Amino acid sequence: MSPASAPRRALLLENIHPDAVAGLEKNGYAVETVARALDEDELIARIAGVDLLGIRSKTTVTDAVLAAAPDLLAVGAFCIGTNQIDLASASERGVAVFNAPFSNTRSVVELVIAEIIALTRRLVDKNTGMHAGVWDKSAEGSHEVRGRRLGIIGYGNIGSQLSVLAENLGMSVFFYDTADKLALGNARRCSSMEELLATVDVVTLHVDGRPGNSGLFGEAEFARMRPGSLFLNLSRGFVVDHQALRSHIESGHLAGAAIDVFPNEPRARGDEFVSELRGLPNVIMTPHIGGSTEEAQQDIGQFVAGKLHDFVSTGNTSLSVNLPPVSLTSQDGGHRLTHLHRNTPGVLATINSVLADHEVNIEGQLLGTRGDLGYVITDIGSQYTSDVIGQLRDLPTTVRLRLLS
Ligand SMILES: NC(=O)c1ccc[n+]([C@@H]2O[C@H](COP(=O)([O-])OP(=O)(O)OC[C@H]3O[C@@H](n4cnc5c(N)ncnc54)[C@H](O)[C@@H]3O)[C@@H](O)[C@H]2O)c1
């Protein structure tokens, strides 16, 4: 950690939104920014003495990076995914990892709404025709979305918010989710994907990326969709068989599609985009931009910076992607200990007996576990001695102990 009087240090890479910098500086951090990703060696060279690390998707936080950062308290992934971080190593070292799981939800939902209307009005074909000099005022095949039936597969953050907005446009909403979900507004739950496919005019996928969802939607599912219906996928590329989608568009069974995510996406800007869906009529393709808006970037910056500071100042881990989720309201004027430990029987009793042996009274306490780890936040009213801290730190189960005040 930085010397007692020095401010805590935050290193933010990859052009993270200025609101994150401002938020951390306002809370007293010395923030260094780097506009690009750093490779492993560069990061190792810079990370000693850093308390908070902020990255986006292009910096890899390896075990070697974490080993070179003994003071590191938390890593902020200013994005959604956290595959670029060695989460097991971070947990082993008591480093909390946070991301922004729903900062771009609204952006995705707005794009879905725009695409449903665009496809229902055949705007893609009209626009392509106009650029080719074709003036076609025909209403054939163009519809209002009002009164049409929308089927949402995956009723999580995105699916449920889409449900609300679509209903406000006058659509009838049906959904299917493998988990029990509260139906919002007048939305109706379907008991199977087959039931949903047989019912609706527009099918949109918003499932998560669990391995079991690979190939979720293929020839059999497209065949079950009602003739003339529309298909959208803004969730994960590997969920859909694009060859099957192509044949159902070409046969005229489906009236159109909007696809934002692909099984094989180009790695870098400028690389060729290869897909079975190129050149099809009434098919909108976008380069994985469902969540890419300036508003989402700003929200991610504010949200993750807030989570990092909250963890440093209170020890609270709610929404951490790797540590046990624990959130205890702070009491004025007291002291707080946080103890990350191996999740074995009796740890809490041992901690409390150390405190009791030193006549330290517990004023608030909360324990959470996640896999092999347990995490307990303890508020105490009286001052603690270095002896108490030494004994807690030396427990064989201790992974990391922090004293917050
Ligand atoms: N296109 C983009 O830029 C973009 C941006 C953000 C999120 N996403 C993706 O959108 C998807 C949804 O995001 P979210 O935040 O709503 O996720 P979420 O975890 O809140 O919701 C996913 C829902 O899908 C359900 N589900 C999972 N598998 C299912 C299945 N086989 N059948 C039915 N329901 C199933 C889950 O129970 C859950 O309710 C994710 O895959 C996410 O990666 C894409």
Image: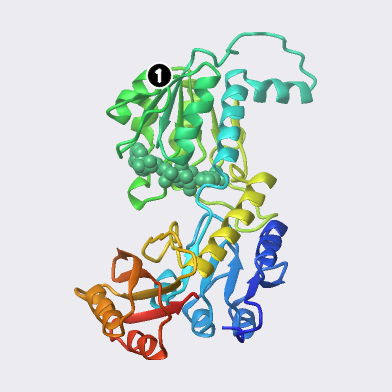
- 27 lies above or below 126: below
Task: Specify the amino acid type for callout 1.
Answer: Arg
Q: Which residue is mark 1?
A: 226
The outermost residue toward the right is 133
Q: Relative to the observer, which residue lies in front, 348 or 277? A: 348
Q: Residue at x 24, y 80 (%)?
A: 353
In the picture, residue 376 is in which quadrant? bottom left
Q: How many marks?
A: 1
Q: Relative to the observer, which residue lies in front, 270 or 193? A: 193
- 84 lies above or below 221: below
Picture coordinates of residue 77, whole percent (x, y):
55, 62
Q: Is mark 1 within 8 Å of ligand 1?
A: no
Q: SS class of the residue under badge 1?
A: loop
Q: Residue at x 56, y 83 (%)?
A: 1
Picture coordinates of residue 211, whole percent (x, y):
35, 52
Density class for disc 1 (Cα within 10 Å; few <14, some 14-19, many ≥20) is some
Q: Residue at x 60, y 13 (%)?
A: 142
- 228 lies above or below 329: above
Q: Relative to the observer, which residue lies in front, 111 or 134? A: 111
Quadrant of ligand 1: it is: top left
- 194 lies above or below 154: above
In the picture, residue 277 is in which quadrant? top right
Q: Is residue 236 visible?
A: no
